[in-house]
Amino acid sequence: MLDINELKFDEKGLIPAVVIDNKTKKLLTLAYMSRESLEISIEKGLTCFYSRSRQELWLKGETSGNYQHIVSITADCDKDALEVIVEPDGPACHTGSFSCFNDKVFEGELAESQFSLTSLMKLIEGRKLEKKEGSYTTYLFEKGIDKILKKVGEECTEVIIAGKADDKAETVYEISDLVYHVLVLMVEMGISIEDIMGELASRHVIDHKVKQEKMV
């Protein structure tokens, strides 16, 4: 285990800390720690940073309630930067966003070939903003919330039938249909993937705390 004294703080006594969500592996924020704030973080198990603008210590979540429970703190090879893995109670950004990193500066060609729920979500959002003739997604948005909810319900039933039949391939197919229609519903209602991940993360933290209390 690395000793704090081995870390290399800069001329102002600070060290950059990259904060990453333990569940999503998404980068949440880049902040700075002083020796004192790092010691507080380790003692409390909660992230505590040093505000360069206010020139004071601040315990993340002390005002907002969006505490970040520390899973691990790791130094880089030069010992002049920290990776902090956390279980957040809520959004990391003061704007209310799940992460502070949202404004894309550049996106290479490879990004278009990488599939993810986020990329699918963006495609669905695009179909709502710019309607495309012949698009099933556009059709759902034109029909409205009742149609979308009906499809979600139908796909739930299909998942149950496939699962009851113990047909793995069919269940995967039907779950995929369900996930797609749920994403359409989320876009229609203005719900982001980060909203869902934040809710799941908060439930995990609550469950973890309950388990700890039962052990006491």
Image: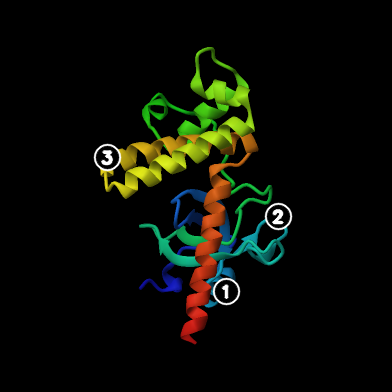
Residue 203: % across, % down: 54, 62
Residue 53: numbered disc: 2
**Among the two numbered marks 3 and 2 on one chain, the one whose residue lies closer to the N terminus:** 2
In whole angstroms, how far apart are the C-alphas of marks 3 and 2?
A: 55 Å
**Among the two numbered marks 1 and 3 on one chain, the one whose residue lies closer to the N terminus:** 1
Q: Which residue is mark 3?
A: 169
Amino acid found under the numbered disc labelled 2: Ser
In this rendering, which labeled residue sits more in front, label 1 or label 2? Answer: 1
138 shown above or below 69: above
Residue 42 visible, this angle = no
Amino acid found under the numbered disc labelled 1: Ile
Indicate the quadrant containing the N terminus: top left, top right, bottom left or bottom right: bottom left
> Which residue is depicted at the point 52% across and 51% down?
197
Q: Secondary structure at mark 1?
A: helix
Residue 188: % across, % down: 62, 34
Q: How many marks?
A: 3
In whole angstroms, how far apart are the C-alphas of marks 1 and 3?
A: 50 Å
Viewed as shown, does residue 36 lie left or right of 70? right
